[in-house]
Amino acid sequence: MAQTRLSCRECHYINHADSQTCENCGSSSLTEDWAGYVVVTNPTDSAIAEEMNVTEPGGYALKVR
């Protein structure tokens, strides 16, 4: 069975289910309550990354509650 991944409330980065802090920004505010998923491979050339203020490649939640 797949584990629920956690999204950071600060930067929306998707983390492993057993994470205590965000692998991207270091925040400890993680939640299972998120929706939508976008993978950013090249943040410098991405309009979506610019809109979401993403500077690092990776998977991000579109909506975090």
Image (cartoon, rainbow, N blue to C red):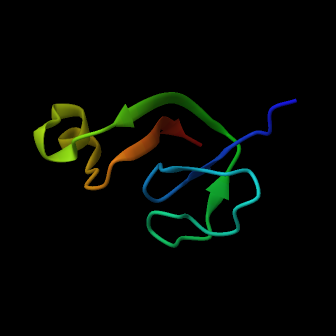
The answer to which quarter of the image holds residue 21 is: bottom right
Is residue 56 left or right of 31 when viewed as pictured? left
Q: Quadrant of the C terminus?
A: top right
Total labels drawn = 0
Q: Position of residue 40 (x, y in %)?
A: 32, 38
Q: Position of residue 9 (x, y in %)?
A: 53, 55
- 16 shown above or below 51: below
Q: Position of residue 37 (x, y in %)?
A: 49, 29
**Residue most toward the right?**
1
The answer to which quarter of the image holds residue 8 is: bottom right
Q: Nearer the viewer, residue 31 or 43?
A: 43
- 45 shown above or below 20: above
Q: Please tell me which residue is depicted at 22% across the width and 41% down the height of the picture.
A: 42
Q: Please tell me which residue is depicted at 64% across the width and 58% down the height of the picture.
A: 30
Q: Position of residue 20 (x, y in %)?
A: 70, 68
Q: Please tell me which residue is depicted at 13% across the width and 46% down the height of the picture.
A: 44
- 57 shown above or below 1: below
Q: Quadrant of the N terminus?
A: top right
